[in-house]
Image: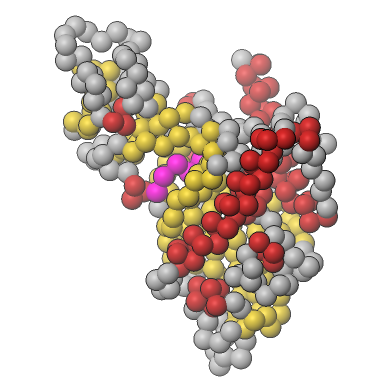
Amino acid sequence: MLDQKVAMVPGMANYPRNQWYVIAYSHELGSKPLQRDCLGDPLALYRTAEGKPVALFDRCPHRGMPLSKGTLKGDLLQCGYHGFEFTAQGKCVKVPSGGAAPAALCVRSYPLLERGGWVWAWMGVAELADPTLLPDHGEIGLEGDGWYPDPGIHLTVKSNYLLPLENLADATHITYLHHGLIDTGNVASMPFRIEAGPTKVRVFRDFVNEPMPPILAKVFHLRGDRVTRTLELSTYPPGLVLVRNSFTEVDVPDPQLKINTLLVAVTPAGPKQTHEFSAFGNNYPQQHPGRFDDVRTILMEDVVAIEEIQAMFDRLGPERCPELSVKADEPAIRVRRLIAAMIERERNSEIAA
C-alpha cells in the first residue's frame, strides 16, 4: 500500500533528494559556468583547471548575483557583481573591496560523479552521497567492453517529473501518440511480463517476424525491414528509463543479436519543470547521422502531450483530476511505490536526527 503521507500524484509528485540525478552532459562543462536548476536549487556548473566538475549553489551570498554569470579565475569562480571569489568547495577566499571574508560568506557545493558521458549530481545530504547507488553503467550500456555509448540531446518539459518518467516507461501509448513512427500498431495490445526488484522495474514484450517502421529500420541499421525482438522498458527510480530492443534480423544470411538501448535520464528541475537527458548505449556502432533528430521528433510528441496533461491538472486541481488505472499501469504503480519508499526513508532519517 502506498504511504499516503508521500504525494505520488502525477502533476504534483514529491521527489527524493538523497539520490543521484543527471544534471548535464560531460561535454557541456568547461571554463564557462553553466546554469541549471535541479530539485529547485539553482546550480552553477563548471570545471577546474584539472578538469574536475564542480557544482555550486548559484547565488552569491553577498548581494545575490547568480554565480553562473561570473568568470573563472583559475580554479576560483569570481562573482560578476563585486568580484568576490569562491573555491570549488564554496568558500569565499577574496573580497576585492578589502577585509576578510566572514566565515558565513560561503555557498553550498554539491557532490558530482561523471560516468558514461553524463554528470550526476547529489542534491541531498553530502555525507550520504554513495556512488554504489548509481545504476550499473555496464548493465545500461554506457560503460564496458562491447558497448558504444552515444550521448544525445537535452530537453525541458514544463511538468512534474513523474509525468515524463511514467510516459517513457509506458509502451502502450506508443501505438497511439506516435502515429506509427516506432511501431506498426501492435505494441499496445502485446502481452507483457514484469520483473520487479528493490532498485528497478523491468517490463518485457516479445515480437516475432515484425515489420519495422522507417525510423527504427535506420536506427537499427537493418538490411531488410523485419526483426524478431524483445522490447524492454526498465525504470531505475527515481529518474532513469531504459528502452532496449534486443533483436535479430529476419531473412538475412547471417543474423546476429543486436542490442539498441535508448536511455533517458529524467531530472526534476523543480516541482513543475523537468530535464530529459538522452543517450544511446548499443552493442554496435551507431552510424545513422539523424538518430538524435529522430529521437527529438519522438520525444517532442511526448512533451506536447505531457505539458497538456500538466496544464489540465493545474487548471482543475487534484480533486477534479482523479486517476483510474488499468492492468498495463502496474509497472508505473510499482515505480511510484519505490520512489515513495525513498522519500519516506529520508523523512524518517530526518526525524531520527
Residue under the image location 61 percent in, 70 percent down: 182
Q: Residue furthest front?
A: 315
* Residue 71 visible in the snapshot: yes
Q: Position of residue 132 (x, y in %)?
A: 53, 42
Q: Position of residue 220 (x, y in %)?
A: 52, 75
Looking at the image, is 328 positioned above or below residue 161? below
Front residue of 20 and 241: 241
Looking at the image, is 6 positioned above or below residue 107? below
Q: Position of residue 209 (x, y in %)?
A: 68, 83
Q: Position of residue 142 (x, y in %)?
A: 47, 58
Principal secondary structure, stretch drawn in magenta: strand
Determine if the magenta segment contains residue 167. no
Determine if the magenta segment contains residue 22. yes
* Residue 136 visible in the snapshot: no
Relative to residue 121, is residue 68 drawn left or right?
left
Relative to residue 34, is residue 334 drawn left or right?
right
Front residue of 177 and 234: 177
Q: How many marks?
A: 0
What's the colour scheme? secondary structure
Residue under the image location 77 percent in, 64 percent down: 192
Residue 273's quadrant in the figure?
A: top right
Q: Quadrant of the N terminus?
A: top right
Q: Quadrant of the C terminus?
A: top right
Residue under the image location 51 percent in, 36 percent down: 269
Looking at the image, is 78 positioned above or below residue 277? above
Looking at the image, is 131 positioned above or below residue 294? above
The residue segment tinted magenta is 21-25
Residue under the image location 83 percent in, 52 percent down: 326
Relative to residue 152, is residue 320 drawn left or right?
right
